[in-house]
Image: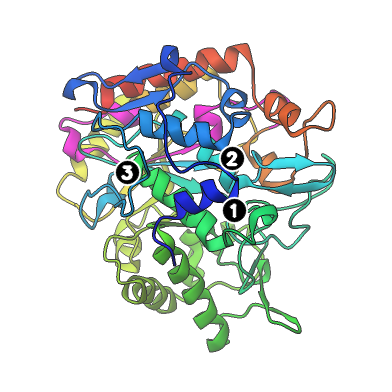
Amino acid sequence: MNSNCVNLLLKAFNKDILLNKNEDFSANVYFSEGCNGRKKWIADILPYELLIVDIKKIIDLIMTLSEGNYFYCEFPDNVKTPDYSDNWGRFANYIEINNRAIAKMSNERCCCGIINLIKLLPAIPPSANHWANCIIISQIFPNIYGDGYNKQKDIENSIYGIKINADYSENIISNEIKDKITQQQQIKAFCDLAHFRGIKVGFRTVISADQIKIVFDDREENFSWQNSDHVEIYINEAVKLMKLGFEAMFIDSAKHIGGYDCKHYSGVGALPSYSQMQYILNEIRKRSSKTDISFVGEKSTGDFERFQNLGLNSGTDYITGDDFDKVKMLSDEFKYNRIYAPGVEIENDNYEGGITYEQRLNRINTALFAYNCSSDKLPSFMQMNDIFPLRYDTNTHEIMMKNPSYSLDGSSESHYENLFAKDDGRNYNRKVAELFVRALCL
């Protein structure tokens, strides 16, 4: 694979690979407090303002925000992920972005979610001195219920049902340029640009057997954990993504692996056994030749030893950021464990409303500052809604389960404008930035 996939992306859109400084958002640049303001990003904005910008100008902007204050006239050939050692995932802030929701929607078709996520990269705070910020993308694989299409608000199009062994979702890649840049190269371009921004990247996946289909040239099969060929395909799909530049995997329903606490299990279908999942995670690390992969799981907290021995670095749903002092005490409790710690939850993918802006900001403040020493920080879990608030009549879970366009005139630009909250969303985005300003150089 061509190592400089960013140049391939620019050429695919008939753009010059020679880069130029972009000062269009200079009034919206936020700088870290300390470390000479090296860490920079765009805030006090609406996502629409970036999503309508030409891809070349976005890449120009990413280069203009270079942490080293050096402007590269061409995108570097070899960009490495920020290095926070093998167990970086135990300390990271995970920010899930629903890349399907921000995709280009034209008539009934949906595409280019990974291209549009590139456009939001300048507005994601970079990693801090002692811990990483990691984007988790909600969709990478084709979804079962209508991939490549948006549907009306009352029709299910769940992101939780996936097809594997079938390349990547039409919701997130651009088929218009596939003769110039492959799906894999489009994804690698995203990973490289995120790494240049000082941000790590991961993806969400599912483990409930009846929510997975295996695609072959002549048929589809329902997934089975008892079928060794299916398990091999599952492992290799993850390995391929790790080799493209991903370094984290968020595992839906991870708490229930091995039949644990299944009275609260809400997935559909059988789950892998405990030893089987240990094998799978180890094989993903081994086959990808990456020792620094972070595996995190939904609700995989409580029995901490069980989940650490499974191979996880963190999990959700143990504590929220509502009580600063409790989180600070938990940070102190786990300060000697540098492999696994429960995460502070701001919002999860099942959120259906009820958290105020003030409560959300308080939780983020807790996640960023509730510790005695910054090197002992607990991991945290946020959603796109925690950085860029959604409009009032939808929520995080709604756009995971459905894929409507909010366009008023049929254009993608109108969808970008109306998916998110407006004036109060901009004000909230600024307040989030003010928290990160104080956190990144601790």
**Where does label 1 land, which residue?**
139
Q: Give the mark nearest the N terminus, 1 or 3.
A: 3
Task: Indicate the secondary structure of the residue bearing disc 1.
Answer: loop
Q: How many marks?
A: 3
Q: Residue at x 17, y 24 (%)?
A: 35
Left/right placement of residue 141 relative to residue 72 reads: right
As displayed, is residue 51 above or below residue 214? above
Q: How is the image coloured?
A: rainbow
**Of circles 2 and 3, which is in front?**
2
Give me the disc on residue 200: none
Q: Residues within 10 Å of mark 3 (few under 14, many from 20)?
A: many
What segment carries the magenta color? Answer: 366-394
Disc 3 residue type (three-letter): Ala
Q: Residue 179: percent from the left, percent from the top?
A: 64, 62
Amino acid carrying mark 2 in the image: Asn
Q: Quadrant of residue 212?
A: bottom right
84 to the left or right of 143: left
Could you tell whether 122 is left or right of 98 in the image?
left
Nearer to us of marks 2 and 1 is: 2
Say what secondary structure mark 3 lies in.
loop
Residue 356 location (% of width, % of height): 55, 20
In what element is the residue under mark 2? helix
Q: Residue at x 53, y 62 (%)?
A: 184
At horizontal 72% and vertical 25% (from top left) the residue drawn is 418
As drawn, 93 above or below 434 = below
On the picture, is 307 further left or further right than 405?
left
Disc 1 marks a residue whose amino acid type is Gln
In front here: 75 or 33?
Answer: 75
Q: Earlier in the sequence, mark 2 or mark 3?
A: 3
Residue for badge 2: 116
Q: Look at the image and say whether residue 281 sits in the magenta stretch.
A: no
Where the N terminus falls, by quadrant?
bottom left
